Amino acid sequence: MAHIKSLCVYCGSRPGRNSHFKKIARTFGEILAAEKIRLVYGGGNVGLMGVIANTVMKCGGKVTGIIPHHLDEEESGWKEATDFFVVDNMHERKRMMFDHSDAFVALPGSIGTLDETIEVITWKQLGLHNKPIIIVNMDKYWDPFLALIDNFIREEFTSAETLNLFHVVKTVEDVVPLIKKLPEIDQVTKNTLI
């Protein structure tokens, strides 16, 4: 696959109780900057979101932050990002994050992170895009989600093919090497939803 130019990261607007997650977010920010991959994220300066965005910028990388008006104050919208957009609503934010990204990565987070991750997986299942989606299952954080998918399959609400819609890795260090091994993205669906 050609070297991707931008990567959307879904992660928590809180740091969480596990200090390891904050450290991993910082490490991933360093990796993105070193690989010259632009970070696309939810625009906040709090939690893991703030950690990764600040790290990318401090390491000389580029960041695109996208935040809806109603969260700009609450999540301390980070205007120091390379590009910072304030949009009208969550739907516009998610669509813009999609359009600006060549791939997606889910780090630990809450229901917002889960919502965003499930949405891009669903869009891929519907054939609306074929961009890589990677879940970083550090410290087995995503095990309950993966068990839920297994239950969907077991109960025959979906097929085992669902597991081919995304990749699971254990560390952030595994993300870029995995993406580089994947097939080229179909240019028809690379940047916009059908």
Image (cartoon, helix red, strand yellow):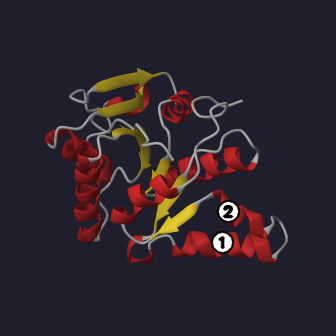
Q: Quadrant of the C terminus?
A: top right
Amino acid, disc 2: Asn
- Is the residue 172 above or below the residue 112 in the image? below
Secondary structure beneath dot 1 equals helix
- In the image, what residue type sits under mark 1? Leu
Q: Tell me the distance, in whole angstroms, between the alpha carbons under discs 1 and 2.
A: 15 Å
Residue at 44 percent of width and 41 percent of height: 4
Which residue is tagged 1? 148
Q: Residue farthest to the left?
A: 58
Q: Residues within 10 Å of mark 2 (few under 14, many from 20)?
A: few
Q: Position of residue 163 (x, y in %)?
A: 67, 66
Mark earlier in primary sequence (1, 2): 1
Horizontal side of residue 57 vs 166, given as left or right:
left
- Relative placement, left or right, of 114 versus 16 is right
Place of residue 143 in the rendered image (x, y in percent of width and height, measured from the top left): 53, 75
The residue at the point 27 percent across, 63 percent down is 24
Q: From this viewpoint, is residue 108 visible?
A: no
**Residue at 61% across, 46% down:** 120
Asked whether residue 155 appears in the rendered view, the answer is yes
**Is 50 drawn above or below residue 91 in the view shown?**
below
Q: Which residue is mark 2?
A: 164
**Residue 45, image quadrant:** top left
